[in-house]
Image (cartoon, rainbow, N blue to C red):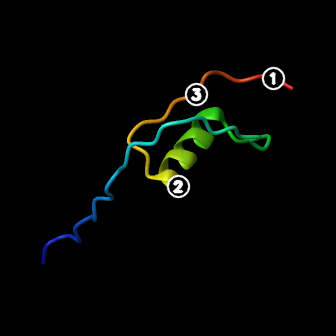
Amino acid sequence: MSPPSRVRVQRRPVHGVLLLDKPLGLSSNQALQKAKWLLRAEKAGHTGTLDP
């Protein structure tokens, strides 16, 4: 029996800026990856963080 195949999600180009007020304990990269996944974006990045 072959292993189950993974379905590839089609990514889309997203242009713009998304401002996040992330909760404490969540890293900037974790927040970035979650937003990228939710938006199904091809690319994503962050401009830095501000410490409280």
Q: Label 1: state its secondary structure.
A: loop
Mark 1 residue type: Asp
**Mark 3 secondary-structure assignment:** loop
Quadrant housing residue 2 = bottom left
Q: Residue at x 28, y 65 (%)?
A: 7
Q: For the residues carrying marks 3 and 1, which lies nearer the camera in this image?
A: 3
Q: CA distance from mark 1 to mark 2?
A: 25 Å
> In this view, which residue lies farthest toward the left?
1
Which of the labelled discs sits on residue 46, or is there none? 3
Instruction: Say which residue appears at 42% left-offset and 36% top-offset.
Output: 43
Image coords of residue 17 (percent x, y): 60, 35
Picture layout, residue 9 above or below residue 42: below
Q: Which residue is mark 1?
A: 51
Name the quadrant of the N terminus: bottom left
Residue at horizontal 87 percent and vertical 26 percent from the top: 52
Please state which amino acid type lies under the numbered disc 2: Leu
How many numbered marks are there? 3
The label on residue 38 is: 2
